[in-house]
Each structure stands twice: as C-alpha cells, then as structure tokens.
Image (spheres, rainbow, N blue to C red):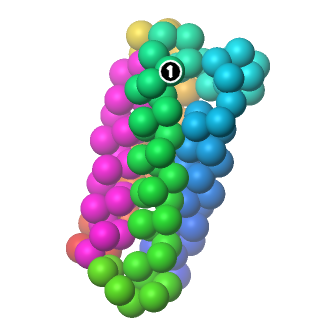
Amino acid sequence: MNVALWAAQAVLALIFAFSGLAKGTWSRERLLAGGQTSARIVPMPLLRTVAALEVLAAVGLLLPGLTGIATWLTPLAAAGLGVVMVGAAGIHLRLREPVAVLVNLTILATCVFVAGGRL
C-alpha cells in the first residue's frame, strides 16, 4: 500500500507542479493554446492564486514524507487538491467538456486515495 501511495503522490505532484507552473507563468493565450480551457472563463488573478496553491500542494505531497517532518501535511495537501478538482470539474461542466470532467474526477479519486491512505 505504501508503494501505491507514493506512486500516486508522485503522479499528483508532477501533474500539479506542471499545471501550477503553467498557470502561474503563461499568458491567457498560451494557456488556452496549451489546453487549459478554464482560462477562458476564470479571471487571471484567481488562476494565479490557484497556481501558487497547486505548486505548494505538490511540494506538500512529497516533502513531508521524504523528510519525516510534518507528515500530517500530505493528506491535507491531497484533500486541498481534491477541492481544486471539484472546482475544475464544475468549470469544465460549464464549458461542456465531458472528457475534461472525467480527467478531473480521476484526479479527484487519486487525491482521495492519497488523503485517506495517509491519514
């Protein structure tokens, strides 16, 4: 189980580190061209805030377990990212993007797995 949790944490950390860095540094036009369709309707200040939280949570998925310090942060990071996925699914529903909603729900399920497994 520990190996599965670490694998899930690593995958989530990669997804959210990339997503957060892109949302935090790319222009709206580049985000849209790169497939981040939520940039069409989400205000850029909110997108930048979510980006910073995603990067912090990506660190929170890995660093506590690697250092043995504040390991309680890992399930909180996973839970917080789950909340982000609920919001993302809502945005993609509004944009009528069912495939993106399924991706969001899959990532949400992985977040729940990590949060529950690390509690």
Instruction: Specify whether residue 89 is painted magenta.
Output: yes
Instruction: Specify whether residue 15 is painted magenta.
Output: no
**Image side of residue 111 versus residue 97, left or right:** left
- Secondary structure beneath dot 1 equals helix
Quarter of the image where one finds residue 24: top right
- Give x and y (percent) for residue 14: 62, 57
Q: Is residue 85 above or below residue 2?
A: above
The residue positioned 42% from the left and 10% from the top of the image is 94
Image quadrant containing the N terminus: bottom left
Q: Is residue 107 above or below residue 13?
A: above
Res. 98 visible in picture: no
- Give x and y (percent) for residue 66: 49, 85
- Give x and y (percent) for residue 91: 42, 19
Write down the residue under mark 1.
44
**Nearest the camera: 82 or 40?**
40
Magenta: main secondary structure equals helix
**Image side of residue 104 versus residue 118, left or right:** right
The residue positioned 68% from the left and 30% from the top of the image is 26
Few, some or many residues within 10 Å of mark 1 (<14, 14–19, 20+): some
The residue positioned 48% from the left and 76% from the top of the image is 63
**Nearest the camera: 3 or 17?**
17
Q: Residue furthest bottom?
A: 68
> What amino acid type is highlighted by mark number 1?
Met
Q: Is residue 88 above or below residue 38?
A: below
Q: Which residues are magenta?
A: 72-91
